[in-house]
Amino acid sequence: MLTLDNTDTVHHRLLKRQIRKFLPPELAERPEMTEFLASINQAYAEFEDDLGRVEHILEQSSNELFKTNRELARIAQEKTEEAATTSRRLEEVVGSISEVLIQMDEAGIITYLNQAWETITGYPVAESLGKKLTQFSLGPSSAEKIACMLSFRGESTKDFFLFPTAGGTDKWLNLSLRRHTSEQAGRAGFIGTLADVTAPYLARLELNRLALVVKKTKNSIVIADADGKITWVNEAFSRLTGYSFEEARGQMPGTFLQGPKTSAEVRKEIGQKLRAKELFHGELINYNKAGQEYWVELLIEPLFDEENNHIGFIAVENDVSARKKQEERINQLVVWINESSEAVQVSDESGTLLFVNQEAARRIGKAPEEITGTHISTIEKIFEQEGTWSAHVQDLKSRSKMIIEGIHKREDGSTFPVEASVKYHESEEGQGYVLAFIRDITERREAEKKLKLYMRDLERINAELDQFAYVVSHDLKAPLRAINNLSEWIEEDISHLLEGDTREQFTLLRGRVHRMENLINGILTYSRAGRIKTNKEYFLVKNVVDELCDIFNTSQAIHFRLEGPQQLQIFSEKITLVQVLQNLVSNGIKYNDKESIEITIGWSEKEEVVEFYVSDNGPGIKPEFHQRIFVIFQTLQSRDELESTGVGLAIVKKIIDEKGGDLRLESTLGEGTTFYFSWPKSEKTETV
């Protein structure tokens, strides 16, 4: 019988492979094995089915996973592009921010800056990272502010400081910082902003200054809306009017400040200007809260916004009541001054003529109203050059009053000399005025010219007289010398014949000749006394007196006593003073009757002169001779008793009279005489 191989039985391919490889044929034919193999085959078949289903499921899952991955990749791409766009937009926003975004660590080292840093400070961002703000040459005050902000333990802080830019300019920066801790790095630090507040800071300073000026100014300031109703006033307004801001707010100034004496024409003009939105400038009378009137200089200016829309008015009022009262007083004087025969003019510090009286205008040849308002240089030549009037006013302020000479110009172009007494006056409100009282000195100038001519003629005549006196004295002394010589020759020739009275007569003859010669010299000296001018110089009185004492230091017993300030210096003709003192001392010695002669020379300083005195211990002079001794050739003793020309004291009196001094004497018989005279302390240099 043909047997069927178990391996040929329909089994799963994997089972068949295992049977052929590992199961003997005899064993495979057994029924129990066949049944076992059938169950295994069944298991393989089921496994095959399950595996197919799993592969199918895996295939389906793989497809789904691929689709999912592809979708995730698409979403990831979209999110990446969206993040890049957001980052780009964020960078654009950060780059467009005008303020500096700054990040610093706990030590204050900069870790992040946006581009605004370079725009504001001028320093490149890359070079600035890793530095501290204090490393940018900050001043001590700014560095201290930064240090305080970094040490602040609160949540946030801000302050402004001065920052030196790379361009060399300084900017005011406002730094705002907030503490920040990074969650990723776990490090603390600061984040914040830096804003350039230079313009608003300076503007605020300027506003503060302006606010202070407005608050402290003496002028009243009023701000009103477009309808003319008050919206703000300063403190000066309240002080002037007596109305507080609360009382004035919402009112129109004219409704409560103006009154009966306020000019209707001025009020009308103000209304017209305000309606036309134009500037008004004028003066008017206002009334304060107590009803008292006062004058104000008023300036009203319309206000416009940036779009040229009218938004209100600003008014500045200056109290000019004091000036008005001053003008009233001046006007009251005008009538009286116009009646004066002396020219009067008033000008301000700029040189504008505010007033001239009728006499001043008459001299110029114009009407007063033609001169008023013009500059003083139009009528006075000395102020034609620029700057001369300003210098004159400054000089006048330091002196208050002065006398000057000038040259006035008439309408027809001619000129005439004037002398003006000028005074500076400042009003209560500080306005300066120059008042001048002017005299026409034409006649005086003509007289001065004539006097100069007379002086020249007098000098010429004096010179001729000096020459004449010299010639005459020479011609007179020549015969006298001849007489003297002849008498000596005759006496020599007949000396053996001369006896007794004859010899005395010859001696007397020569004595009379010498006396006549001395008289001629005295006349010549007297004629020149006071006319011959010597150089004026500074000298010490003490030195002059010492030199004089040395001149009289002879074998004769003379004791000099000097009394006066040692350092007194004067400016005068030294030689002339020596001549006076020498004559007085010589007189005290010559006529002294004491064995021991005592001469006292003293001097003392007065206001404008020096008082001199020369005393002696001689016989004294009787009162009836006190004037006679100053007459030329007058002597108290016979010339035969004491030889003298009688010229010395006459010369003294003539010189002192020429100096404008006083000469007197005090004398006690038997005790002595004292001569007193005054001498100018400082003489002017004379010019012709």
Image (cartoon, rainbow, N blue to C red):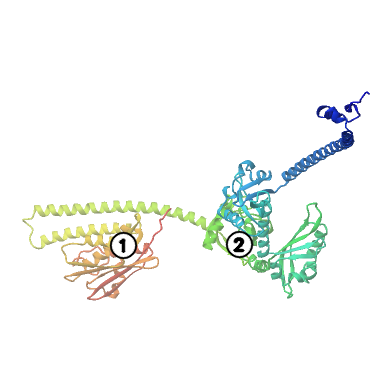
Instruction: Residue 193: give x, y in percent of width and height.
Output: 68, 51
**Does 21 sit above or below residue 435?**
above
Q: Residue furthest right?
A: 1
Q: Which mark is residue 433?
A: 2
Where disc 1 sits, the SS reads helix
**Does 12 sit above or below residue 214?**
above
Q: Which mark is residue 541?
A: 1
Distance from the alpha carbon under mark 1 to that under mark 2: 47 Å
Amino acid tagged 2: Tyr
Q: Identify the image quadrant of residue 255.
A: bottom right
Instruction: Residue 387: give x, y in percent of width and height.
Output: 57, 51
Q: Residue furthest front?
A: 1
Amino acid tagged 1: Val
Callout 1: few (<14), some (14-19), or many (20+) C-alpha neighbours within 10 Å? many
The answer to whether residue 14 of the structure is visible from this angle is no
Tags 1 and 2 in contact by the CB under 8 Å rule?
no
**Does 364 sit above or below residue 320?**
above
Q: Identify the image quadrant of residue 233.
A: bottom right
Residue at 78% across, 54% down: 305
Instruction: Residue 185: give x, y in percent of width and height.
Output: 65, 49
Q: Residue furthest left?
A: 496
Looking at the picture, tell me which residue is in the foreground, 617 or 653.
617
Callout 2: few (<14), some (14-19), or many (20+) C-alpha neighbours within 10 Å? many
Residue at 93% across, 23% down: 2
